[in-house]
Amino acid sequence: MRPKFQSKQEVIIKAPLETVWEFNQDLSKIAEYHPRVSKVDFISGKQFREAEVSYQCHVTDGKNTCIEKDIEIIPMKKIVTVLPSDTMGLNKLLPDYVVETTFDKVDDYTTKMTISHYYSTSKFKVWLLNFLIRPKIARQTQEMLNSMKKTIENEYSGNLGIFNNDLS
């Protein structure tokens, strides 16, 4: 059973679904678009996502890490990720934190990517802190999605030989 829905962020990416999906499958790319991740270790020994694959993200502060694990993958549709451990205390505060990433084809050259967050707030402390946690998670996720959009669109348009600033 999934914990309570908390927030959802989305972005429209001007690239085909297959391009967006393929980009997201490569765990080595996380540090390219995630503003708070400087490096990723493949602790399951795999660079590409699949169910039960874990990876460790090093936070840009240089002190903290988190381990993420993909628990469900439906090709071209959905990735479900959990946070088994971290050095920041998030896992202790939100032990049932689940992130669901969905991919929807808008048309042949456009993809909508949505990230939804789920976690329980049954403890009074978490319920109270959620007034601070939820907007921060939403803001940081939207920043990450915007960065990913820019990275994918630049890579995709470069692969097509299109130079966005040379259209004069």
Image (cartoon, grey):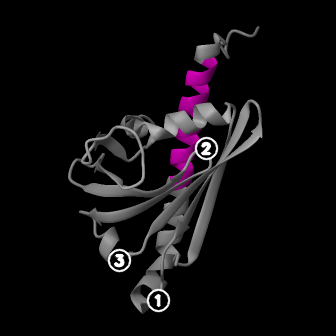
> From the viewer's perspective, is 152 left or right of 122?
right
Foreground: disc 3 or disc 2: 2
> Toward which corner of the image does residue 28 lie, by quadrant?
top left
- 113 to 154, vertically: above or below: below
The structure residue drawn at horizontal position 29% and vertical position 40%, both measured from the top left corner, is 39
Find disc 1 in the rendering and name its residue.
122
The structure residue drawn at horizontal position 44% and vertical position 80%, both measured from the top left corner, is 129
Question: How far apart are the alpha carbons under marks 2 and 1?
Answer: 34 Å
Residue sitting farthest toward the bottom: 124
Q: How many marks?
A: 3
Coordinates of residue 149 in the picture (x, y in percent): 59, 37
Find disc 3 in the rendering and name its residue.
93
> From the viewer's perspective, is 168 left or right of 144?
right
* Local secondary structure at mark 2: loop
- 61 to 161, vertically: above or below: below
> From the viewer's perspective, is 121 left or right of 56?
right
- 143 to 127, vertically: above or below: above
Image quadrant holding the C terminus, namely top right
Question: How far apart are the alpha carbons under marks 3 and 1?
Answer: 11 Å
Residue 76, numbered circle: 2
> Toward which corner of the image does residue 117 lie, by quadrant?
bottom right
Which one is earlier in the sequence, the residue at label 3 or at label 2?
Answer: 2
Q: Which residues are magenta?
A: 141-157
Coordinates of residue 62 in the picture (x, y in percent): 22, 47
Which one is earlier in the sequence, the residue at label 2 or at label 1?
Answer: 2
